[in-house]
Amino acid sequence: MKTYALLTAAAAIWLSLVGASSAADFQVTTQVYRGNERSPVVTYQTIFKGAKVYDVVTTPPRQATIIDFDTGQLTLLDPQRQVKLTMSTQNVLQRSAFFKTHGRFPDQPLWQFLKDPSFQTNYDPQTQVLKMEGDPLSYEADLQPVSAQPTVDAYARFCDWSAQLNFICAASDLPQARIELNNQIRSRGALPTQVHKTVRYADPTKTISLRSMHQYRWKANADDEKLIQLLETDLTKARAVDFDEFVRPAFSTAQK
């Protein structure tokens, strides 16, 4: 039953990619904060250009993800090492399913929850606040309704694939909880302007609080084009490597 559920979820994500409607070009700047800190721990610039998404970590060390919705290819680029990893959507889903069923996860409440997340969901249309309460993980998101559903769909698809890539390539959380949040936002024809993620532990001093702020720009500008050209140039210079060689530094860092 578990394997069937994983394959069903994977198929749904794949179909959402290949069946995508065309969305207008737009740009998103995302800043992630820890707790009440005033300076972001990481900043992303995400450019939606035609059938491609260019997602760049603008805080050093700069890295990028390029997703091509037409070809179904996802490319991870590390300009510092001048290496790149290109995977098909099928390969990403296969690795994700394998890691979910064969990975050795910590024997902690969070990881047990992430294997099969269950939320109490509430949305207030007046305040446009979405709350998803789980134990020990909860989300609270401020939403911005958008009239163009293809734009909503494009952003949700990107977030789904980012969750999968972070899981298999950066030793991050199991992706299903984040995908459920994406689905809830998408079903309301909205984009998130702010997302609070809280992980509670028996010891309150260990509670984790992360806040992401999202700002949208609905027209491409010259800076976007320059960044895209820079990334395309970096892609031509980068050496293609296999999965193990590309992700080894991420897993080494995560285990320290």
Image (spheres, grey):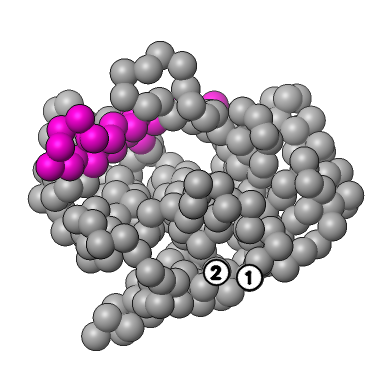
Extreme residue in the front direction: 256
At 38% from the left edge and 58% from the top edge, which residue is drawn? 175
At 54% from the left edge and 29% from the top edge, which residue is drawn? 43
- Within-10-Å neighbours for mark 1: few <14, some 14–19, many 20+: some
The answer to the question of whether label 1 and label 2 lie on touching residues, with beta carbons closer than 8 A, is yes
According to the picture, the residue beneath numbered tag 2 turns out to be: 92
Q: Is residue 161 left or right of residue 108?
A: right
Front position in the image: 173 or 191: 173
Residue 176 to residue 91: above or below: above
Residue 100 makes an appearance in the image: yes
Asked if the magenta segment contains residue 160, the reply would be: no
Which disc number belongs to residue 88?
1
Stretch of the chain drawn in magenta: 192-218
Residue 154 makes an appearance in the image: no
Element type where label 1 sits in the image: strand
Compute the Cα span from label 1 to label 2: 6 Å
Q: Where does the image place residue 16, in percent across and percent down from the top left?
A: 45, 65
Asked if the magenta segment contains residue 207, the reply would be: yes
Amino acid on which the number 2 mark rests in the picture: Val
Q: In this view, does 197 lie to the left or right of 68?
A: left
